[in-house]
Amino acid sequence: MPTSVKPAALPAKKLLPFILAAFGFTWLCWLPLLLNKQFAAGMPVLPGQFYLGSFGPLLGTLDL
């Protein structure tokens, strides 16, 4: 007698915090860079800030 097994899916209540944390941290780091480049905003920028923003998805996974 075959039984149907549903694949494990990531619940929506875990997906939303991941997306918010990943995109939020990334854009928090990248927004000053964008504003300085596009509008000459004169915001302070750390050395390596672009690379720091790439850790947003990692922080999103740690949030889960």
Image (cartoon, rainbow, N blue to C red):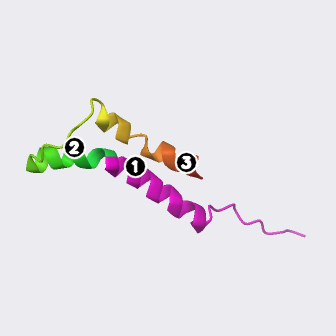
| x 37%, y 36%: residue | 52
Quarter where residue 43 is shown: top left
Q: CA distance from mark 2 to mark 1?
A: 14 Å
Helix, strand or loop at label 2? It is helix
What amino acid type should be assigned to the residue bearing mark 3? Thr
Q: CA distance from mark 1 to mark 3?
A: 12 Å
Chain-order first, disc 1 or disc 3: 1
37 versus 12 height, above or below: above
Give the side of residue 21 with respect to residue 1, left or right.
Answer: left
Front in this rendered view, residue 64 or 44: 44
Q: Nearer the viewer, mark 2 or mark 3?
A: 2
* Mark 1 secondary-structure assignment: helix
Q: Is the N terminus in the top left, top right, bottom left or bottom right quadrant?
A: bottom right
Q: Which mark is residue 14?
A: none
- Asked if residue 10 lies left or right of residue 60, the reply is right
Answer left or right for 9 relative to 57. right
Q: Earlier in the sequence, mark 2 or mark 3?
A: 2
| Residue 22 painted magenta | yes
Helix, strand or loop status at disc 3: helix
- Near-viewer residue (41 or 26): 41
The residue sitting at 45% across, 59% down in the picture is 20
Q: Nearer the viewer, mark 1 or mark 3?
A: 1
Residue 45: image location, x then y, percent:
23, 37
Residue 13 position, x and y percent, is 59, 66
The dot on residue 33 is 2
